[in-house]
Amino acid sequence: MQPIYINNVASIHPESNDCNQPYLIASEPDYKTIITDATLRRRMSRIVKMGVACGLECIAQTAPEDIHAIITSTGLGCLADTEKFMNAIIDNKERMLNPTAFIQSTFNTIGAQIALIRQIHAYNVTYVHRGLSFESALLDGILKIGEGNSNVLVGAIDEITPVAYTIQKRLGLLKETQAGEGAQFFLLSSEKNGKTLGEVKGLETFVRPDSIEEIKDKILAFLERNNLTNHDIDWFISGKNGNRQQDAIYAYLENSLFSEAEHITFKNQCGEYHTASSYGLWKVITTFSEETNSARYALIYNHYQTINHSLILIRRI
C-alpha cells in the first residue's frame, strides 16, 4: 500500500462528564471564530456546526485548491434536525411543512458546507455504514491517495440527543455502556512534511465473525500482510465500552496476542457511538506527537455491538 500520512488532525469531543446527563456531551468551541458568517451559523444545527468547525480547523492551513477530496462519515446523522422534521409532520398533520429541517437533516450536509465555505470543488461523499462508517470513509481516502491525489480530508461526526438516548436504551444498545458523541477530522497526504503526525499502514473491516478464534486469526493475517507479528505491536488500542460481554473479546486478545503491548482504551473518554473509532485514531495520533517513547506501531481494534469489526494499523513517524 502506498504510504498514507496524517499531516493534521482536529477533534471536538467530551472533555468532562456532566453528572446531570446520562451520556457524554462534546465540549464545543466558540464557533464565531471558526464559522464567521453569523447568518450561516444560525441556520446550522448543533451537529452541523460541530462537524463543519472541526473540518475547517483541520484544513485551516491548507489552500482550497490543494484539497482533492472531502470524505465524511456518520452513523446516525443529523438526529436533532430529523426529530424536528418528524415532530413537524405529526404536529401539522403532514401539511404545510417547512422543508428547512429536512434539508439540514441529510447526511451529506456537513461535507457540503465545508466545501461551500472553503470553495473546494472536488470529490465529496458521505458514508453511512453503521459501525463501519468511519472506516469506510478512511478506506475511500486511502484509495483516493492511491489514485494520485495529494491531500484528502476524512472526518466522522455523530451526535446524541435525549430522544436518541432513550430509544437506544430501550433497544438494549447501551447496556452497561455510556453513550457519547464527537467529531474528528484527519488530513491524509501522499507526502510527509515537518508536521506529519503518523502513517496509516493498514486497514481492514469484517462483519459477524463466528468466534473469538476467528477474530484472532484475522488479526494475525492482517499483521502478516503488513510484514508484522503480534510482538511488533507496541500499543493495542481497544474499544472497551463497559459491557462485560462485549469487552470479553478485547480482554481475550490483550491476554493471548498482545500481552507485551501497552493496553489503551478510548470509549471511557468519548463514549460509545457508531464512529467512536475516529476518536481512537485521534487519540493515538495526538499521543504519538506529544509523548517521547520508543513506541512505533499501534493497532486499533474496535467492534460495534460485536457485529462490525475494524483494524487500523498506525506507524509512528
Image: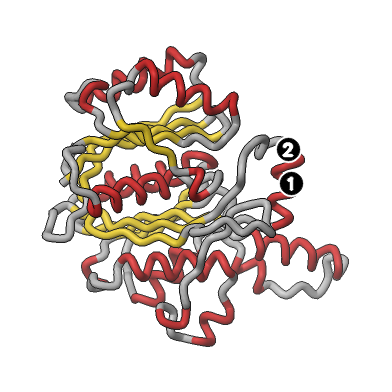
Q: Position of residue 185 (x, y in %)?
A: 37, 58
Q: Secondary structure at mark 1?
A: helix
> What residue is pinned by disc 1?
167
- Above or below, comparing residue 35 to residue 196 in the picture: below
Q: Position of residue 289 (x, y in %)?
A: 23, 53
Task: Quote the CA–CA distance across marks 2 and 1.
Answer: 6 Å
Q: Quick one: quadrant of the N terminus?
A: top left
**Mark 2 nearby-residue class (10 Å; few <14, some 14–19, many ≥20):** few
**Viewer-side residue, 37 vs 174:** 174
Q: Amino acid at mark 2?
A: Leu
Q: Position of residue 175 (x, y in %)?
A: 67, 35
> What residue is pinned by disc 2?
171
Name which residue lies at 61% across and 44% down. Answer: 178
**Viewer-side residue, 110 vs 194:** 194
- Above or below, comparing residue 111 to residue 229 in the picture: below
Asked whether the viewer can see residue 224, the reply is: no
Q: Secondary structure at mark 2?
A: loop
In-image side of 211 versus 8 (left or right): right
Q: Which mark is residue 18?
A: none
Q: Position of residue 221 (x, y in %)?
A: 29, 19
- Above or below, comparing residue 293 to residue 71 in the picture: above
